[in-house]
Structures are given as structure tokens and as C-alpha cells.
Amino acid sequence: MNICILEADTPSDDLLDIAGTYADMFETWLSPVMPSAQFSRIAAYQGDLPASADEYDGYFITGSLNSAYDDIAWIHQLQDFVRLAISDERPVGGVCFGHQLLAQAMGGTVALCKSGWSLGSTEYQTTSIGSEWFRQDALQALAFHRDQVVKLPPASSALAGNTHCPWAAIAYGDNALSVQFHPEFTPDYVSALIRQDSEGTIPAELADLAVNNLAHGDNDTVARAFARLFDQR
């Protein structure tokens, strides 16, 4: 199976040495549970996309410092491509920005969270459908976001969430799966990302609390859920 990672951004130069590019992180995270997959990568944030949806067997959309609702040409083009891929029954996975872009492309709404940042090790409770996808009643994961889905798309299923982020995991039938949190990130990377705080918007007390309580979480559990999405094809 040939999977294309649609890169929605690239880490800043001072973070690249920690874990590589976002596509590198996705491959490191997913390869152990998808040993037969071949991963390719395309820089969607530079305006590049596959010529057609059937060029690859499935797609992943990475995180980004951009917002899904930004009025930028490549974001609109990526949304159009996502809709095309899903209509062509190609499995699509998304993380953070990818989660938000999927929701927006499918008719949901994304906005800045009124409660502020969600950072570091975070617990999410799974719904009845979510427990079928993840095979657990709760998930521990690393979060780093202010934007989030505030209105579910039609014909989607909420899989996991908490009071801060009610829709942290969403499925679209058996065609697409996305999560707001970062199962591809390591604690070291999240710590560096928080300390970098390129926009200067993270309160120091919140940053310290998050950095001092980082753990890997259920990254493998989430990876296996994505593997099942792709393996059923």
C-alpha cells in the first residue's frame, strides 16, 4: 500500500534536529503498525498535490502552524483534494491541522478555542463508537493547539473528547479518521515546541505545568486505529 503524507507545514530549523520533518514523524510513528506501507510525501503547504486522488492508496494530513480557516490558496486547494479523495473512497487520516481541515472540508466549523491552549499530556474519553475504533474507554495523548473543531460535520461520528475539546477525534464512516492531538509527537518535541512559543501566546505557568508532565501516551493505540482504516481497503 502506497500512502501519501500531505505535509501542511515544516518545523522551524531549530526544531528539525529533534525529530525531523512532520512526514518523518508520521513514518516513525506509523511504520511499526503498518509494516507493508510505503510512504511518500508531498508539500501541500507549497501548493503541491497529487495529480489525481487515485495516485495513492490513501492520504495523511499533518499538523501546521496555519489555521484551517486561513484564507490561503493552498489550504482551499487541499480541502478540495480531501473531498475528492473521500468521494473516490481513498482513506484519509488527519492530525491537528489535518483534523481541523478534514472537518471544515466536510461541512464542520473550526475556530479559536475560547478556553485557550490545550497543552501537554491530556486525557480524552471515548464515545461508544470511539471505543470500537480505539478499543479503549479513554486515551492519553500529547496536545498542542488553540484552534479546534467547534461544530461537527454532517455524517460524522464523534469518537473522543473532553470538556476543553469535545471533538478531539472524529470518523467519517469508514472513509476517514482524524484526531486533534499529536500521537506522532514525542515528549521532547512537544517540550521544545512549547518553549519555543513562536507567537508568544502561551502563559508561562501553563507552559511550565505542561512541560513538567509530559508522557508518550497511547500513541501506538491511535496508530493501530489508523492502520485498521487503511488496511480494510
Image: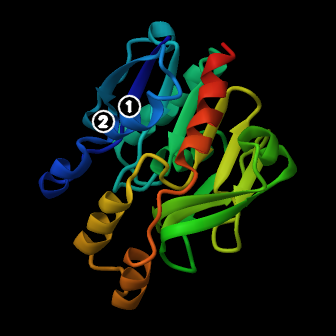
The answer to whether residue 190 of the structure is visible from this angle is yes
Kind of residue at disc 2? Asp
Q: Judging from the image, what secondary structure is the residue with disc 2 in?
A: helix
> Percent x, y for residue 173?
77, 31
Q: Which disc number belongs to residue 27?
A: 1
Q: Which quadrant is home to the C terminus? A: top right
Q: Is residue 202 left or right of residue 112?
A: left
Q: Is residue 216 left or right of residue 125?
A: left
The answer to whether residue 198 of the structure is visible from this angle is no
The structure residue drawn at horizontal position 74% and vertical position 39%, both measured from the top left corner, is 133
Q: Which disc number belongs to residue 24?
A: 2
Q: Nearer the viewer, residue 25 or 47?
A: 25
Q: Judging from the image, what secondary structure is the residue with disc 1 in?
A: helix
Compared with 203, 154 (above or below) is above
Q: Nearer the viewer, residue 233 or 157?
A: 233
Q: CA distance from mark 1 to mark 2?
A: 5 Å
Compared with 48, 200 (above or below) is below
**Are the residues flagged by discs 1 and 2 in contact, CB closer than 8 Å?**
yes
